[in-house]
Amino acid sequence: MGSVAENIVQTLVANGVQRVYGLPGDSLNAFTEAIRTEDRMEWVHVRHEESAAFAAGAEAEMTGELAVCAGSCGPGNLHLINGLFDANRSRVPVLAIAAHIPTIEIGTNYFQETHPQELFRECSVYVEYVADPAQMPRLLEIAMRTAIEQRGVAVLVIPGDVAMADVADDRRTVIRPTRSTTVPLPMQLLEAADVLNSAKRVTILGGAGTAGAHAEVLAVAERLGAPIVHAMRGKEHLEHDNPYDVGMTGLLGFASGFRAMSDADAVLLLGTDFPYPQFYSDDARYVQVDIRGSQIGRRHPIDVALHGGVRETLMALLPHLEQKKDKHLKDAQKHYARTREKLDDLAAPARKGQPVHPQHLARRVSELAADDAVFIPDVGSPVVYASRYLTMNGRRRMLGSFSHGSMANAVPQAIGVLAQDRTRQTVTLSGDGGVTMLLGDLLALTQNRLPAKIVVFNNSSLNFVDLEMKAAGLVPFATDLENPSLAAVAEAMGIRGIRVEDSADVDAALTEAFAHDGPVLVDVVCDPQELTIPPAIAFEQARGFALYAIRTVLSGRGDELLDLARTNWRQLF
């Protein structure tokens, strides 16, 4: 009979897990030794445990299957926590093995002692401490089942001596996901139909829950004459092949998406947890569909709540909906066409010798990338440009830290995407702040031979934080970044590095990067004064910018206002 650690690895292999992301440590010795002796399991070595958790979450999001990461006791597994928060909030199945100090030392303030089961409770759907080998493999099976069924993070806290001990029962159970459909009761469907049929102007807002329901959403939009607005996580599922699409709303969105929502007298929310109350109209009635009933009504009061999967609920709802005229839809489409034209105008090349417009860079990334590329924007201004300029087609994917909102997500998530499929083109839209925050894991790309294409929007600043300060009426402080040539840094790490300082060189650099058979970092110098203007500017934001202008002049930095005006004149007129 083998050890607890060997049983864990063999059970994971039996369940189709092919790799574990992490860093070794003495408290993980039994676990890493079990992986070393198992040819069917790969150890994906990263340089920071946060990257291991982000990578596992990205793999789980790409495959829909359980992914695994591991960290040693104390600081080692503590580093997992940010990536695990992201995975749990993105609702993807991840198992984290959190090694612990020797059992007899727990509670003595021993070297590296923490209480992992308390630390991970908020970022998991299951966390348990394995105090005795006799608890295994039952706790492993419970953890795996919970992560898979609830689509979240499960954490097993295992002292190194327990992992090394003989397992009491060496069974290897295969956890098969359950499959079922959830549809609201007929009376609730009729209530929803009554709200939608009595409305004159219906708008649909869809999120990640619309995955697999593209045809059903379009059928309902056609019946209701409804424009479709998508949240960020709904973009890859709804934007493509969609004549009803009018873009996004929210801080990252388009004016057309905002207007389609504000003009509606009824809104149908589909699988979305869109978090910004200020972008919901108080003058509309709301019907919300979500597979998790507890999510309904969190962001805005709801008139009719439908607990069910989006696809099956819309199939059941459609026969009860009356055909509407399409005036509201046509108005929204016209507004979208004007908005799209203005956004595309901003994506023009900069004048020779001027920093690259980030809009131009994002659009050329989209136009030159593969038809089945995976895009991963860093949180901050790259997410804005991804939302506005990356084109989805039903085969492309877009991942990010869209719910948790963590910086430095892009490169670690690229590790997870490529580890499970090294042939698929994977492109990050990285901020200079994000890529340097976890800079060491560029080495994980070379060590694991992962051909990521890292496109850095290098504006020498924490650009989105800078914008938030200006909108609050503050003179930006502590947002500047003194960067080396990131292309040169990449070359020193064994990655092909390309530096771009002029718009005329963007296409050649991206073409070379996408054709290269290994990892590439394209370091693009972008204009730091470029504003990412939201679709609707509140009075407080306008007031804040006025205060910012006054305070900037009074602080002796009036030249910044000239640079700001020079860069953004084309956005305003």
Image: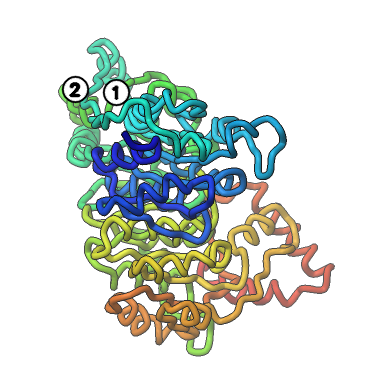
The quadrant in which residue 185 appears is top left
The number of discs equals: 2
Q: Identify the residue under disc 1.
A: 308
Q: Residue at x 34, y 50 (%)?
A: 59
Secondary structure category for the residue under label 2 = helix
Report if the CB atoms under discs 2 and 1 are less than 8 Å apart: yes
Q: Identify the residue under disc 2.
A: 316
The quadrant in which residue 175 appears is top left
Looking at the rendered structure, the kind of residue marked 2 is: Ala
Q: Which is more toward the observer, 338 or 319?
A: 319
Give the colour scheme of this rendering: rainbow
Q: Residue at x 53, y 36 (%)?
A: 159
Q: Which mark is residue 472?
A: none
For marks 2 and 1, give the CA distance.
10 Å
Q: Is residue 387 above or below residue 320?
A: below
- Residue at the far left: name it: 319
- Residue at the far top: name it: 187
- Left or right? Give the position of 56 relative to 441: left
Determine if residue 317 is in view: yes
Determine if residue 207 is in view: no
Classify 10 Å Cα crowding around label 1: few (below 14), some (14-19), many (20 and above): many
Q: Which is more toward the observer, 370 or 134?
A: 134
Q: Residue at x 33, y 32 (%)?
A: 148
Secondary structure category for the residue under label 1 = loop
